[in-house]
Every structure is written in C-alpha cells, then in structure tokens.
Amino acid sequence: MRFEIFTLFPEVFSPYLESSIIQKAQDLELVEFHLHNIRKWAIDKHHITDDEPYGGGGGMVMKPEPIFAAVEDILGSPPDCPVILLTPQGRLFTQEIAWELSQYPHIGLLAGRYEGVDERVRKHLVSDEISIGDYVLTGGELPALVVLDAIIRLLPGVLGDPMAPLKDSHANGLLEYPHYTRPSTFRGWSVPEILRSGNHAEIARWRRAQALKRTWQRRPDLLKGAELSAEDKEFLSNLDEIKDEDKDDRGA
C-alpha cells in the first residue's frame, strides 16, 4: 500500500514511520510512504503557503495554489486515488473506516495547519475529510499518523498473528478483554486462575464475557452495533439486573 503525505512539516513523520510495526511493514515491502513538503510548490520566492482570511478574523489560512499544485503534480488531475484532508470538521475516524481505507492500494493524506485550508481545497480537491476526535490540534500531522497506524495494522502480513486485528478493541464492536503476563503474582495481585488452566474453550468463554462486561461498563453505546449471540444477550441482561439491584440497595 502506498501513502502520499502532503504537509508543511514532513520532519514530524520520520521518527514514527521508522519505528516498530510500521518500519517492519516497510521492510517487508507491504507499505511505502512518500512525504511531500507543500512549500516546494509555493510560487513566490519566500515559499509562502498561508495568508489572511477574507472577511477578517484571527489566524491564517492555507492557500489553495500550493496545495492544488502539490497534489495534482503527484497524483494527477483529478487525483487517481482518494485524497483525505485531516480536519476537526471531518467524519469521525473509526475502526470501520480504517478497514474501509485499508482496501485501497494508494491513498493521499493532506495535513492542514493554522486555521485550516481554503474552502476550495475542500470542495474541489479532496475526496474525504476525517477527524480523529472532537478536539482541535495544532495541525493534521498527528491525525495523519493515527490514520496511517490504524490502517497499516490491518494489512495482511504486517502483524505476526493474522487474526490479531480481529481481536482488537472495536474490531467486533466490543472493547478487548483484559490481558495478563508473567509473573503470575505481582504485589499480591494474581492472574485469574482460568488463564492458567490450559482449558482453551473456557479461556475463550471467559475472555468473551470479560469483553462484554468491559464494554457494558465503559462504552455501553458500542453494544448497540455489536454482533451478539443469545448467550451474550443473556450475560448482559444479568449484568443489567445486578446494576438495578445495586441501585435499589443504594436507594434503601
């Protein structure tokens, strides 16, 4: 999979892209990155890429000319692959969207800065807009890295366990179950006996129950879209009954 990254600060990306799983994916030739400094396409001698907003107001706005020139020079006109603008106004990034984007062989990512990009970039150049959360960052570089990381984990061959992406939190609509490793006892806290039993069927059942319980406790909204068996629903219904009993006891 190939990523074209358009940014004013390409140096932000290199340390992360050259580390851990992402570096491994590059070594295996499963993914490649091409960083493009938008300033190189600015037409004036000072390489200016921003200007004051029409109508007044604080901050600066990224100019359309260098952005269009950079993207069209690399990807053609119109671009021959999806071009995603990282912006707080975009659709909220989810694991489902990561799966969707992982199906493309080639993607462009545009990291905005300052007050954002000229509206003509939104309307006539990018094909999608993505936000990683309901907050504002200094620029789109960190969101671009988040999107990259989430997508790359899903590419076949990147992770040692091919089933790992299917077990992650949000992969099946649930948060992931608790994990433990050695030592079996630490500061008096012990690993659940079931995980040391060697009974894989019971371990799988315990993990499913824990994933359901953790989601019910922390993100009950996710349960509405999760695929739940009759056994899952019965388990959750028992949790709801316990919760109601606790409320009654506190009321008493």
Image (cartoon, rainbow, N blue to C red):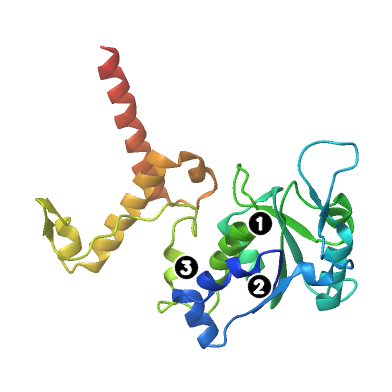
Measured along the vertical axis of the image, is residue 111 above or below residue 17?
A: above
Q: Amino acid at mark 3?
A: Pro
Residue at the farthest top position = 252
Q: Could you give the CA–CA distance between mark 1 and mark 2, rounded to whole angstroms?
A: 22 Å
Dot 3 surroundings within 10 Å: few (below 14), some, or many (20 or more)? Answer: some
Q: Nearer the viewer, residue 129 or 145?
A: 145
Query: What SS does tag 1 mark?
Result: loop
Q: Nearer the viewer, residue 70 or 225?
A: 70
Q: Amino acid at mark 1?
A: Gly
Residue 5's image quarter? Answer: bottom right
Residue at x 78% of width, y 73% of height: 81
Q: Left or right: where does residue 148 sit relative to residue 202?
A: right
Residue at the farthest front position = 45
Q: Nearer the viewer, mark 1 or mark 3?
A: 1
The answer, for residue 153, to whether it is visible in the render is: no
Residue at x 57% of width, y 87% of height: 29
Residue 152's image quarter? Answer: bottom right
Q: Could you give the CA–CA distance between mark 2 and mark 3, rounded to whole angstroms?
A: 14 Å
Give the label on residue 165, or none.
3
Residue 32's image quarter? Answer: bottom right
Q: Amino acid at mark 2?
A: Gln
**Label 2 sits on residue:** 103
Measured along the vertical axis of the image, is residue 244 above or below residue 252?
A: below
Q: Left or right: where does residue 116 sit relative to residue 142?
A: right
Mark 1 or mark 2: which comes first in sequence? Answer: 2
Residue at x 81% of width, y 77% of height: 74
The answer, for residue 10, to whether it is visible in the render is: yes
Mark 2 or mark 3: which comes first in sequence? Answer: 2
Q: Position of residue 87 (x, y in %)?
A: 70, 51
Dot 2 surroundings within 10 Å: few (below 14), some, or many (20 or more)? Answer: few
**Label 1 sits on residue:** 140
Query: What SS does tag 2 mark?
Result: loop
